[in-house]
């Protein structure tokens, strides 16, 4: 009577359970609760009517042999407690996943086995989705050309992609888990440096991007890397690790070094060219000076002198380029100041007699503009020095160069005797004015002449 009441109480309790519960005795089900029936899809009475456990009815064929083997172990070892997972098949052929716990007990004073069956289908599906997600993430990372790794706050590797695993000499990304940089083929000093930088990024909680570093790889070769390090946070914002990515820029670094080397060679070559051009122009200038010294004919001497100054104007530009760090641009303000000094010395003109005012912006020109513009200034100043102030008359020359309305504006003016009305700038007859007209057209400029209070040339280009 007492036993019957105990069994009824047991049945009442187990039928409220969310787990399938059963008792096997003599290799036959002696008790099955409602939840087990629900999980397997078989009626309680039907299960109890089976002459044996009939594993094939609710275990998927893929798992049948291993499960049969586990049950044989259960039946042969009275002290064994078994736990395993398997794929099952319900009565309606629906697939499910279950976890089984089984242990020997005494039932009605005889040996029996108590089993608990838990439906873990949703858990298994969630795990499978997580595995798929992780596999997809790993697949993506393995196909990214960069090298990727991540560590915990103890600087222990938690994972990496295939590229990183290869250079780290661990083969498969799984093999890096649990390792530190000191387990990898880096030099000790490099491992210490990597750990120090990673620790600092996590400590400061501040990402680092596009940092160039060197690394000794598994094959012993030195590589150049462009690295990024980002602290990882949990849902509460606490730093829990670090994500590192880097790209092997060794070939790019070599290409950059080659380009730098070639540019250096080109720079040296260009400097040598400018130096030689300057020297050759100076030789021509010296020959013109020598030629002038061999004649007493003043018009010839003046013509040779003007030609000599034009050549010196070009030579001065090449001297500037030779001495400049930028071989493509000339500091034109400094150049003009030196050019003016040269012209005053050349014609032996005192600044006390013909003073000079300059207002030149900080402008740089390339060779294509600097040479014609320098020659223009030479012609205009030479014209003022030679013709604007006869009979040792005093005066002033004004030079300005600035940008106005997206155009350069060059003005060279004097307060001398002025340009004769008979001279037509658009149809010049003299060499000097012909050069001024040609040089203005060369820089695609326009020229205007102001004849009031002396002579003023305004060139816009």
Image (tube, rainbow, N blue to C red):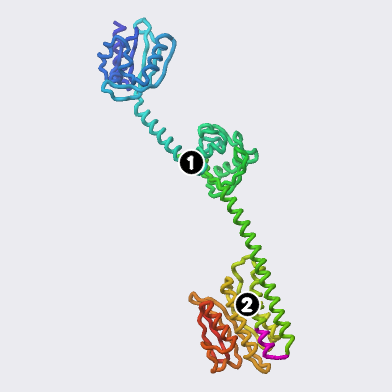
Magenta includes 186?
no
Q: Which residue in the structure is indicated by mark 2?
A: 336
Front disc: 1 or 2: 2
Q: Which residue in the structure is indicated by mark 1?
A: 233
Q: Quadrant of residue 83?
A: top left
Q: Is residue 298 above or below residue 258?
A: below
Q: Which residues are magenta?
A: 296-306
Coordinates of residue 225 in the picture (x, y in percent): 57, 46
Q: Is residue 304 visible?
A: yes
Instruction: Say few, some or many: other residues with alpha carbon within 10 Å of mark 2 (under 14 / 14 to 19 / 20 or more).
Output: many
Q: Is residue 31 above or below residue 382?
A: above
Coordinates of residue 140 in the picture (x, y in percent): 44, 40
Helix, strand or loop status at disc 1: strand
Answer with mark 1 or mark 2, whichever residue precedes in sequence: 1
Magenta includes 298?
yes
Q: Quadrant of residue 65?
A: top left
Residue that appears at 54% across and 94% down: 422
Q: Quadrant of residue 94?
A: top left
Q: Is residue 241 visible?
A: no
Tag count in the figure? Answer: 2
Q: Is residue 378 above or below residue 325?
A: below
Q: Main secondary structure of the magenta part?
A: helix
Coordinates of residue 185 in the picture (x, y in percent): 61, 36
Which corner quadrant holds the N terminus? top left
């Amino acid at each position: 009577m007492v036993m019957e009441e105990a069994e009824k109480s047991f049945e009442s309790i187990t039928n409220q359970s969310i787990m399938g519960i059963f008792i096997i005795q003599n290799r036959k089900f002696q008790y099955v609760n409602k939840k087990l029936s629900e999980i397997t899809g078989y009626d309680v009475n039907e299960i109890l009517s089976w002459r044996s456990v009939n594993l094939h009815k609710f275990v998927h064929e893929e798992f049948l042999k291993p499960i049969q083997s586990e049950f044989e172990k259960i039946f042969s070892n009275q002290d064994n407690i078994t736990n395993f997972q398997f794929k099952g098949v319900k009565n309606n052929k629906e697939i499910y996943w279950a976890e089984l716990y089984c242990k020997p007990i005494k039932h009605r004073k005889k040996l029996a086995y108590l089993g608990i069956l838990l439906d873990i289908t949703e858990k298994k599906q969630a795990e499978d989705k997580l595995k798929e997600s992780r596999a997809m993430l790993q697949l993506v990372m393995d196909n990214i050309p960069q090298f990727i790794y991540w560590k915990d706050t103890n600087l222990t590797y938690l994972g990496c992609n295939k590229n990183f695993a290869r250079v780290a000499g661990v083969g498969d990304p799984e093999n890096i888990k649990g390792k530190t940089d000191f387990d990898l083929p880096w030099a000790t000093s490099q491992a210490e440096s990597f750990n120090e930088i990673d620790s600092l990024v996590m400590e400061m909680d501040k990402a680092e991007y596009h940092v160039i570093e060197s690394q000794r790889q598994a094959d012993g070769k030195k590589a150049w890397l462009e690295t990024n390090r980002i602290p990882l946070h949990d849902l509460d914002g606490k730093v829990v690790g670090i994500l590192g990515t880097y790209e092997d820029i060794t070939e790019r670094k070599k290409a950059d070094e080659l380009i730098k080397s070639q540019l250096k060679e080109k720079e040296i070559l260009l400097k040598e060219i400018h130096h030689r051009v300057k020297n050759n122009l100076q030789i021509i200038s010296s020959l013109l000076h020598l030629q002038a010294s061999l004649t007493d004919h003043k018009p010839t001497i003046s013509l040779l002198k003007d030609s000599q100054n034009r050549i010196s104007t070009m030579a001065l530009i090449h001297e500037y380029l030779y001495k400049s760090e930028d071989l493509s641009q000339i500091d034109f303000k400094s150049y003009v100041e030196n050019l003016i000094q040269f012209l005053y010395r050349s014609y032996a003109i005192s600044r006390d007699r013909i003073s000079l005012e300059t207002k030149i912006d900080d402008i740089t020109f390339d060779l294509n503009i600097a040479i014609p513009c320098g020659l223009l200034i030479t012609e205009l100043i030479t014209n003022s020095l030679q013709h604007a102030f006869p009979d040792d008359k005093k005066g002033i020359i004004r030079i300005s160069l600035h940008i106005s309305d997206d155009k350069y504006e060059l003005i060279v003016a004097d307060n001398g005797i002025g340009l004769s009305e008979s001279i037509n700038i658009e149809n010049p007859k003299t060499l000097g004015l012909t050069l001024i007209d040609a040089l203005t057209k060369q820089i695609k400029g326009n020229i205007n002449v102001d004849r009031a209070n002396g002579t003023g040339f305004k060139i816009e280009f």
